[in-house]
Image: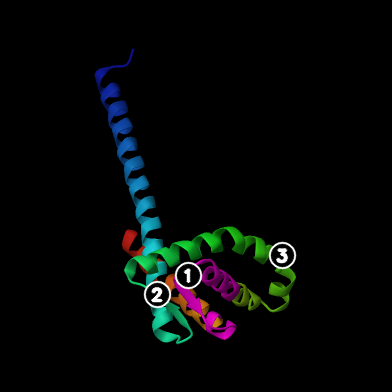
Amino acid sequence: MLNAQTQSITLYFRESFAWSKYILDTLYSMSLLFRLVSGALSFWAATSLISGVTVIGGAKTYLWVAFLFGLINGFIGPLLKLLTLPAILLSLGLFSCVINAAMLMLTARWSNKLDVNNFWSALAASLIISIVTAFLNQLFKKVTK
């Protein structure tokens, strides 16, 4: 049988674990939300800087396009990068920019809200999206630490 002090310590750790799990779940959902918003902001930056890429609509449309781009990049992107691994290695990683542009063009094909005129616009836009997203993710990591 446990004494009162041991029981109170055990209860404290159980409550602390429950709160830490809640906090971690909240941070994880905030992280997903932040990634979606950062994707939308990066698409806004790309459409502002590149004339060949347009998003038809407002903020909800940017969120939708960012969500769809994330899904395509998450499911099809790794498979395509695995299949083109020799080209990526031979080009010292530069071919992955071509794959990202292809993912952006595929997103435009599957969404009627995103319009990409040509491959070069997609390549420039994918570079801007990558840079802005990486910057915002680093900023988010610093804020959450």
Distance CA(mark 2)–CA(mark 1)? 8 Å
Q: What is the three-letter code of the residue carrying label 2?
A: Ile
Could you tell whether 72 is left or right of 64 in the image? right
Q: Is residue 138 visible?
A: no
Quarter placement of the C terminus: bottom left
Q: Which mark is residue 56?
A: 2
Point 56% across, 74% down: residue: 105
Between discs 3 and 1, the one toward the N terminus: 3
Distance CA(mark 3)–CA(mark 1)? 28 Å
Marks 3 and 1: which is nearer the front?
A: 1
Residue 63, image quadrant? bottom left
Could you tell whether 30 is left or right of 70 in the image? left
Colouring mode (rainbow / by chain / secondary structure / one colour)? rainbow
Which element carries disc 3, helix, strand or loop?
Answer: helix
Magenta-span inclusion, residue 112: yes
- Stretch in magenta: 100-122
Quarter placement of the N terminus: top left
Q: What is the three-letter code of the residue carrying label 3?
A: Leu
Q: Front-most of 46 and 137?
A: 46
Distance CA(mark 2)–CA(mark 3)? 33 Å
Which element carries disc 2, helix, strand or loop?
Answer: loop
Q: Which mark is residue 112?
A: 1
Marks 2 and 3: which is nearer the front?
A: 2
Which element carries disc 1, helix, strand or loop?
Answer: loop
Count of numbered tags? 3
Q: Front-most of 125 and 107?
A: 107
Q: Which mark is residue 83?
A: 3
Could you tell whether 83 is left or right of 29 in the image? right
Q: What is the three-letter code of the residue carrying label 1?
A: Asn
Q: Are marks 2 and 1 in contact (CB under 8 Å)?
A: yes
Q: Front-most of 138 and 60?
A: 60
